[in-house]
Each structure stands twice: as structure tokens, then as C-alpha cells.
Image (cartoon, helix red, strand yellow):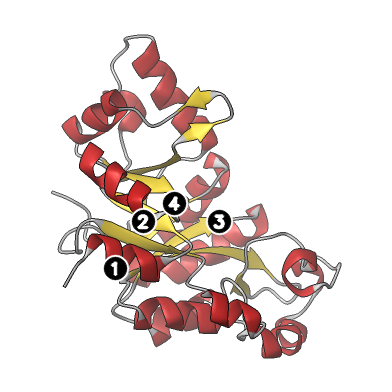
């Protein structure tokens, strides 16, 4: 049986990468992972939102991708060095900051794909996710961070996707002609790029192997509508995109 995060969700899965920031929103100064970006994705008709989390100095789990504020706000400090109140002020004109628990409470019908970006955020994020496990997928570049968050969410069981180490193990097992059942065990989705440097990660063989073991394949980050259609035609289950509005138009024609 598929995890509730996937069961009943529309296909193909469209995951709004860090919410949705349209060109008009960008011109107005609104940024990724902000409250405005989350609301824009939901308003566009996207029922899966991919986001990231860090921990503030005062222990609040906030939706933010980078370890520091520089790229998004021009402030050189790390997220871990500011309080939530300080971040509220910094983000006020940029679409607004939102905490993980606020997002889950404010949008109870939305499925969230949560990327754990820092070890310090893993345990508190997991505890927040515990009561929402049926509509959450946990992932991280670091398998350690993901495992910590999942352990903290117990007895709830969010869906899961492997990190870098897990993906390497799966791809290597396939290339070496070994069984992938063990490498895929415990995962509900395999969220991967098409390529990693010179290595082609996404292949028809990988899609087929994942599907044989009941694991979906979601590809990031795809913003070209024609490529979205091609990937879905290949058998990809989900598209992670910065332009959920374009994805909905391309993949869910009225």
C-alpha cells in the first residue's frame, strides 16, 4: 500500500519547489519559501509543496533553504544566528517568514515535502511532523539528518526519500547488476536530478526498478513544460518545479 502522502494525490505529482514565486512576485520582492510563496503554490492548484527547514537561534523551525540569509535577503548572518522575531522583520517585505508548524496548521489539506537542511533542525522538525505524518515526506541531502527527523517523528511515519548516500547506493546497485530491493527498502519516493555532473541518474532502468518495488520517482528541478511532459511520458511520477503554475497548465489540461 502506498503511504498516505501519495495515496489519493493527483497524478502526475507536481511539487512546488520552495513554493511558487512567479516573475511578478519576484519583481515585487517576494522570495522563495516565504508565506506568500507557499500560498501562491496552493492558490495555483498545487497540493504538494516542497520546502526546506532550518533552526533559528531561539529554537524555531523556519522554512528557509540556505544556511545564511545572504542570497535571499542580503543579510550575511546565518539563520542559526537570528531569532524568529528578527527573521520576521527581515522577511516582512519579502513575502513573510513562516515556521514549519504554522505552515502545517495553516494549510491542513496540503501535502508538504520537507527537506531537513541542518542537523540542529532534525529533531525539532521531526517532533513537529509527528502528528502530520500522513501528509508529509521527509528528505535531506544528508541521510543522517533525514534519519534523525524520522526517528523524532515516531511513532508517526512520514513518507521518505533517500539522501545523497542512499541515491548513490541505489544507482550503484543497479549499475553493478545487484538487487536494488534492499537499497530501496524504507523509501516511498526516489527524488533525484536527471544528471549529477557527468553521471546520468535518471534512466528508464531506474524508473522500472523503483516501480517494481513500489517506489515513485520524482525529478528535480524541471521548469520547462516540454521537458515535464517528456519525463512524465518516460514514466516519472512527479515533477519538482519552481514554476508550479506552468506545470499545472502543462500536465493537467482542463
Q: Distance of mark 2 from mark 1, alpha carbons?
A: 8 Å
Report crowding for label 2: few under 14, some 14 to 19, many 20 or more residues within 10 A (C-alpha): some
Pointer 3 with pointer 2, Cβ within 8 A: no
Residue mark closest to the camera, 3 vs 1: 1
Quadrant where the C terminus lies?
bottom left
Residue mark closest to the camera, 3 vs 2: 2
Q: Distance of mark 4 from mark 3, alpha carbons?
A: 21 Å
Query: Nearer the N terminus, badge 3 or badge 2?
Result: 3
Pointer 3 with pointer 1, Cβ within 8 A: no
Q: Secondary structure beneath disc 3?
A: strand
> In the displayed structure, would residue 177 be above or below residue 198?
above
Residue 65 in sight here: yes
Residue mark closest to the camera, 4 vs 1: 1
Residue topped by disc 1: 249
**Of 254 and 55, which appears nearest the observer?**
254
Residue 98 in sight here: no
Q: Residue furthest right?
A: 76
Residue topped by disc 3: 116
Residue mark closest to the camera, 4 vs 3: 4
Residue topped by disc 4: 222
Pointer 2 with pointer 1, Cβ within 8 A: yes
Please indicate whether residue 119 sits to the left or right of residue 253 in the image.
Answer: right
Residue topped by disc 2: 225
Residue 7 occupies which quadrant of the picture? bottom left
Query: Nearer the N terminus, badge 4 or badge 3?
Result: 3
Report crowding for label 3: few under 14, some 14 to 19, many 20 or more residues within 10 A (C-alpha): many
Q: Distance of mark 3 from mark 1, alpha carbons?
A: 30 Å
Amino acid at each position: 500500500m502506498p503511504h498516505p502522502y501519495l495515496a489519493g494525490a493527483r497524478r502526475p505529482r507536481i511539487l512546488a519547489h520552495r513554493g511558487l514565486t512567479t516573475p511578478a512576485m519576484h519583481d515585487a520582492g517576494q522570495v522563495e519559501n516565504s508565506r506568500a510563496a507557499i500560498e501562491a503554490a496552493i492558490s495555483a492548484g498545487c497540493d504538494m509543496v516542497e520546502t526546506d527547514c532550518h533552526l533559528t537561534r531561539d529554537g524555531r523551525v523556519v522554512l528557509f533553504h540556505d544556511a545564511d540569509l545572504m542570497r535571499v535577503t542580503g543579510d550575511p548572518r546565518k539563520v542559526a544566528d537570528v531569532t524568529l522575531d528578527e527573521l520576521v522583520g527581515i522577511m516582512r517585505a519579502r513575502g513573510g517568514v513562516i515556521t514549519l508548524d504554522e505552515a502545517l496548521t495553516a494549510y491542513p489539506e496540503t501535502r508538504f515535502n520537507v527537506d531537513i537542511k541542518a542537523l540542529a533542525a532534525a529533531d525539532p522538525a521531526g517532533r513537529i511532523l509527528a502528528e502530520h505524518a500522513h501528509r508529509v515526506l521527509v528528505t535531506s541531502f544528508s541521510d543522517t539528518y533525514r534519519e534523525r527527523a524520522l526517528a523524532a517523528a515516531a511513532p508517526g511515519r512520514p513518507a521518505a526519500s533517500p539522501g545523497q548516500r542512499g541515491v548513490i547506493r541505489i544507482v550503484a546497485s543497479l549499475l553493478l547488476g545487484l538487487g536494488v530491493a534492499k537499497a530501496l527498502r524504507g523509501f516511498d519516493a526516489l527524488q533525484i536530478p536527471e544528471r549529477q555532473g557527468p553521471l546520468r541518474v535518471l534512466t528508464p532502468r531506474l524508473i522500472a526498478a523503483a516501480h517494481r518495488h513500489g517506489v515513485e520517482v520524482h525529478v528535480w528541478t524541471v521548469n520547462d513544460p516540454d521537458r515535464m511532459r517528456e519525463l512524465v511520458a518516460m514514466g516519472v511520477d512527479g515533477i519538482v518545479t519552481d514554476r508550479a503554475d506552468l506545470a499545472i497548465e502543462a500536465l493537467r489540461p482542463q
